[in-house]
Amino acid sequence: MMKYKEELRETASQLAAQGKGLLAVDESTPTIGKRLAGINIENTEKNRQAYRGMLFTTEGLGDYISGVILFEETLYQKHLDGESMVSKIHNLGVIPGIKVDKGLSPLSGGHELETWCKGLEGLAERTAEYYEQGARFAKWRAVLQITADGCPTDLAIRENAWGLARYARTCQDSGLVPIIEPEILMDGNHSIERTAEVQEKVLVEVYRACAENNVFLEGTLLKPSMTVQGAENTNKVSSEEVAKMTVRTMNRCVPAAVPGIMFLSGGLTEEDASVYLNTMNSIENKSTTSLTFSYGRALQQSCLQAWQGKNLEAGQKALMARCQANSEASMGDYVSGSQPSSQDTLFEAGYKY
């Protein structure tokens, strides 16, 4: 009998609440360094503390955000005023979560571009500690890539699906709701139809592995890529086509027991991430499962540019604008352009962090 079963069910339901999504602030130290470098801020713990502290003192954030995904440093960190970051997050009515994977490693025996995700060793002990520290959900990012010469291979699909399932079960044994994230990178020039074909194969394998590991699906969330074409494909498709293909893929492959599908932005611009999500939620008979967001860059790009290391109010205002936009999009109510957004491309080739 799973000890935390009812708690997991309740937490997952709260995270997938109507009109809310997740703020991903789980960038590793090197990755947040790249973000800070973009506004000429040095990557020091004090500056990371100041930036993340700005996010977690944004009044009203809990109106649009149900949970925040943290990097380990932040889970144990204090705000500049001495109060813990976890307390600041709780004050907003938001649930703290934690990134638990240990990054990507080359997959021996697979294609040279393929990876597997590290972090299972010692995970049970770490997740128990994270629960004691206040985290109530977790994230593990597996990465797959589509290429003209055979990626993703069956080996990579099986390896990453099994890792996600083992992580998910381990988290649940410690009381953490696992976010299952099989990301398919946008790199390449493949068609949207090819993405859908691969994504269906990946999701079927993921949920097969979850069944074999006795994962409690009602206490999980899915964080998939949207079904989009390769970033180098010049035959651009409409938001309607992205929405139709994404909803079709999810309906075909995601068990109805999963309470929430929290899409990653995966290098989409801030505005596109909102428009695509809104269009999905405007489709009649789309799904009984919540279709919402778990964005990192697509919620923070404008915020970083406005903050600039010192402009607290401007940074928080920009953050709230994007959170409101995506909250509205998760209900099919977003009017494109009604909130300020950055049109900068957020795509990074081979984004592994």
Image: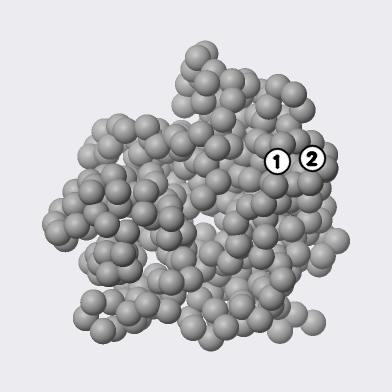
Residue position marked by numbered label 1 in the rendering: 114
Q: Which residue is drawn at 21% across and 81% down?
A: 81
Image quarter of the N terminus: bottom right
Q: Which residue is drawn at 67% across and 73% down?
A: 123
Residue under the point 75% across and 47% down: 107
Element at label 1: loop
Residue 131 x/y as whole percent: 55, 81
Q: Quadrant of residue 73?
A: bottom left
- Three-letter amino acid code at the position of disc 1: Glu
Residue 61 x, y percent position in the rendering: 30, 63
- Front one among 276 and 345: 345
Query: In the rendering, at what x and y percent does residue 164 appear?
Result: 71, 58
Task: Mark 2: give few (<14), some (14-19) or many (20+) Cα within 10 Å.
Answer: some
113 sits to left or right of 337: right
Above or below, comparing residue 60 to residue 283 in the picture: below
Residue bearing mark 2:
110
Q: Considering depth in this image, is 120 or 298 the residue closer to the camera?
A: 120
